[in-house]
Amino acid sequence: MRSISEDQFRSWSHGLRNSDRSSYAELFDATYNTFIRYAMSIVHDQNAAADILQDVFMKLWYIRSDVDPKRSLRSLMYHMVRNYALNHERRKKRHASEEVEADHPSVRFDILVDEKLDADVLQAKIRHWIDVMPPRRKEAFILSRYEGFSHEEIARLMDLAPKTVNNHIILALQHLRSHLSEFQERDRVVGDHKER
């Protein structure tokens, strides 16, 4: 979606303010896949992500007369998706605290110890390590590494100083490297033990 220009977003903003359904449909078609991926990176549930996107687009149509073409519609939509997704996560935690405890990293860390390290296992671990990062650090990392935004763009989207975004990314990478190193060492020790 980064290939979509700000001029195009401004055009859609004008269309929304004028209740132009074709602009609304174009915006939906052009951005849906990107925003559902972003919602998925927070909620990890395809159905929940689809519900979030439905709510976001309904809300966007509802507030269309308040959309300001001078402000970034792209940023507004990222904020809306993030807020709806985080609200979903808060509700889920509130109503399923036992399930959340069972899903705590200390419980899940040993699940794959006896399996051979392969791409799927590693990918699942990385997703889990990203998921347990503090929310703002996780968001900055996802926008940087998965959505391809620059630190300056992330700073604008998250309303942070670029230096703060940089710190979030550095800490996220350190977090992942540390867990990866532990995981590889544990995998090596288990492999050595099996050979004996």
Image: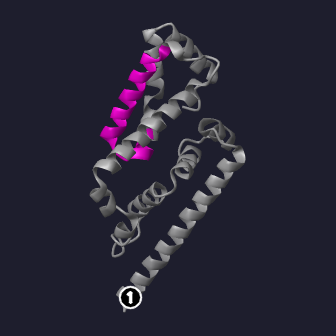
**Which residue occupies the foreground of this view, 106 or 41?**
106
x and y, in percent, of residue 74 in the image: 56, 28
Q: Which residue is mark 1?
A: 193
Residue furthest to the bottom in view is: 196
In the displayed structure, 44 sits above or below 100; it is above
In the picture, measured across the screen, residue 136 lies left or right of residue 114, that is right
Is 44 contained in the magenta span? yes
> Which three-letter amino acid code belongs to the residue tagged 1?
His
96 displayed left or right of 60 = left
Chief SS of the magenta region: helix
Say what secondary structure mark 1 lies in.
helix
Please say whether residue 120 is one of the residues in the magenta stretch: no
Q: Percent x, y for residue 59?
A: 42, 23
- The residue sitting at 70% across, 44% down in the picture is 162
Mark 1: give few (<14), some (14-19) or many (20+) Cα within 10 Å. Answer: few
Residue at figure coordinates x 42%, y 28% from the top left: 56
Please give the count of numbered marks on the rendered protein.
1
Residue 190: image quadrant is: bottom left
Asked if residue 179 is positioned above or below residue 148 in the image, the reply reads: below
Residue at 61%, 16% (x, y): give it: 69
Q: Quadrant of the C terminus?
A: bottom left
Residue 152: name its quadrant. top right
Q: Indicate the quadrant where residue 102 lies.
A: bottom left
Image coloring type: one colour
The stretch in magenta equals 39-64
> In the image, what residue occupies the spot 46% across and 58% down?
132
Single out the residue that lies furthest toward the front: 94
Q: Position of residue 90 (x, y in %)?
A: 38, 46
Between residue 42 and residue 65, name the one nearer to us: 65
